[in-house]
Amino acid sequence: MLYRTGLRDLVLIKPIRDGADQLKIVSGYATHTMASWHMTEILDQKQDMIEINLIVGMCRFDGLAISVHNGFKDLVSGNNRAYQSPFTCQYVTEGPPVHSKIYLWEKDGRPFRAYVGSANYTQAAFSPARSELLHDCDPNQAREYYDLIESRTTYCNHAEIEDVIMLKPAHPVLSVEESPSISLSGAGISKVKLSLLTNRGDVGFGSGINWGHRRNRTKRNPNEAYIPLPAKIARSGFFPLERRHFTVLTDDQKQLILRVQQDGDKAITTPQNNSLLGEYLRNRIGVANGAFVTKQDLLNYGRTDVTFYKLDEEQFYMDFSTEKPQLEI
């Protein structure tokens, strides 16, 4: 049967409800933000965690963005995280490039269900805004094809993988230099500045950077944090909505996966673990891990806001430095 709508649930979630426990994917193109979204969606829907094995087929031919490559490696390194499905990622490094897309579900080690079609393993391909087709196919034949392609792959975290595939800058306006800074060419790039303070001009208690500190003594990770997002900016289309994940490259060369969430799209968080953003901000500010952050802490650091530059629909640059980013002329 040919499927045109409802692909996200049909192909990526429903097989779990039917007992499948492992997903093997061959996709010409793929992104770490899709894998992150998929893992988080499984948890949000209270489904059992599964094993995800991804093969990316076109990276040797077309190259791969550094941010995507690093994102895949970070997901692989997080396989012991309680909130993350076990994940492997391999790149086709021998023979012809692979442009096909196949989704093979297994149950107890045996082929269970499979789909083939046009949809890459990306958020864009599985969004309602994109027209894609998938067709169910014989799972045993899908397993044979997956095994054939897998024999020509190398794991994304292999020590020599970066000598085999071509890595590209995360975006044309960014250049990674020898110093631990990223030069930013601001020409034509839209940006927004988001305050870490409340409307009253102070830090929140149980909200914002101190989301994990609750007055009612509710037990939460004290590092939990979000960046407040005003409704006007949320409605402007600057950030992706509908719980889509996006990559943020920071001025100190870190990389985060964020999303907009909460009622009214009022918060920017690290979706796989809400404490990751709080840990990052506390480390930058120079306060203890898990500490309550005061307005004076932010003033001592030199900033009470962060600036986001929109590079594309899934990539942003976040400046939290106390000096202006270096502009290329």
Image (spheres, rainbow, N blue to C red):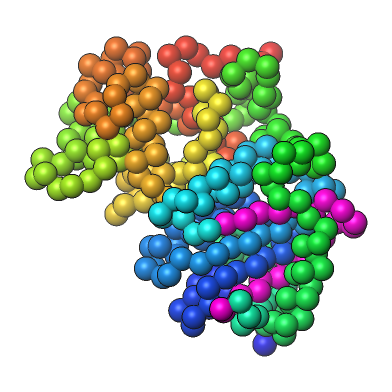
Q: Quadrant of residue 293?
A: top left
Which image quarter is the C terminus in?
Answer: top right
Q: Is residue 319 visible?
A: yes
Highlighted magenta segment, given as a residue range = 87-108
Q: What percent of the width, then of the height, locates residue 167?
A: 75, 37
* In front of the other: 143 or 129: 143
Q: What percent of the width, then of the height, locates residue 150?
A: 77, 62
Q: What percent of the width, then of the height, locates residue 76?
A: 58, 49
* In front of the other: 111 or 128: 111
**Residue 147 in the figure: left or right of residue 224:** right
Q: What percent of the width, then of the height, locates residue 13?
A: 50, 72
Residue 93 on the magenta segment: yes
Q: Is residue 133 above or below residue 136?
A: above
* In front of the other: 92 or 315: 92
Q: Is residue 308 above or below residue 80?
A: above
Farthest bottom residue in view:
1
**What residue is rendered at 52% in x and 23% in y?**
252
**What residue is rendered at 87% in x and 53% in y?**
94
**Residue 156 in the figure: left or right of residue 153:** left
